[in-house]
Amino acid sequence: MKALICYDTKYGSTNEICKYIKSGIKMDTDIKKVCEVDSLDYDIIIIGSPIFIGKPMRSIENFIINNKEKLRDKKIAVFVTCWAMATKYGDASKEFLDQIKKNLPPSDLICEKALPGKLLLDKISEKDKLIMGRLLRRIDAMSGEFDSKKIVWRDARDRRTAEDFGSEIENSFKKKFNIY
Ligand SMILES: Cc1cc2nc3c(=O)[nH]c(=O)nc-3n(C[C@H](O)[C@H](O)[C@H](O)COP(=O)(O)O)c2cc1C
């Protein structure tokens, strides 16, 4: 039995999260960046993307759309990495998961999870700084409670949560097929 973790990243932090997920899975697991995936001949396909302005990366959306037929009836797990999960606004991540799932064909979705990511504002591109500035001003204006000045930007990735997600995927898969 084999699993594939297929992901993309803009600033590199999701790569590490894939390694954590893999270490929670006992079965043989490949990690591939979406542009390197050449076969979907796996028992479980785990698809993950960081969230930018409420959406998964275009490459991941395209991968799902372009492989719609091949993904049909496969056992699939999805995850997103995002800043919201590092804050008390983690509920927003339900929408992010809906976004990554929206183009999936009728497949067997065995698990889904939003994981906290890494966001250091001084390490992102000038263009993304402007985009983040606009996004934060919008949320500041929309919510009386939210105050972007109080946010501590950091690496919020959590090895344990990601490993547990890996184990959860494998256990759900085995339960479905009565494998003990
Ligand atoms: C321009 C920009 C927009 C972002 N938009 C969101 C967002 O809408 N919601 C969220 O929770 N996180 C958002 N993030 C945080 C990223 O999802 C987080 O930094 C992620 O861990 C990046 O993954 P990567 O290092 O693999 O590219 C944004 C980050 C940047 C730089």
Image (cartoon, grey):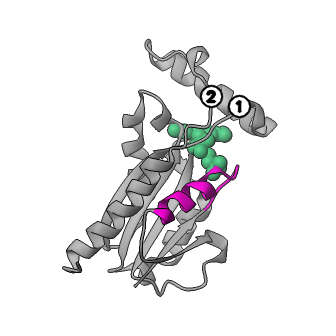
How far, Cα to Cα, is label 1 from label 2? 7 Å
Q: Which residue is mark 1?
A: 121
- Residue at point 47%, 29% (across, down): 87
Q: Nearer the viewer, residue 105 or 155?
A: 155
The residue that mark 2 highlights is 153
Residues 28 and 69: in front is 28
Residue 47 placed where, x, y %? 48, 65
Q: Amino acid at mark 1?
A: Leu
Near mark 2 (Cα within 10 A), the count class, few <14, some 14-19 or many ≥20, is some
Assign the C terminus to one quadrant of the image: bottom left
Q: Quadrant of the N terminus?
A: bottom left
Amino acid type at image mark 2: Trp
Secondary structure of residue under mark 1: helix
Q: Residue 121 placed where, x, y %?
A: 71, 31
Magenta stretch, main secondary structure, is: helix
| Quadrant position of residue 91 | top left
Circles 1 and 2 in contact, beta carbons < 8 Å: yes
Residue 35 or residue 111, whichever sits in front: 111
The magenta segment is: 8-23
Label whose residue precedes the other's in the sequence (1 or 2)? 1
Does residue 141 belong to the magenta stretch? no
Can residue 35 be spotted in the picture?
Answer: yes
Residue drawn at the location 42% of the way across and 29% of the way down? 89
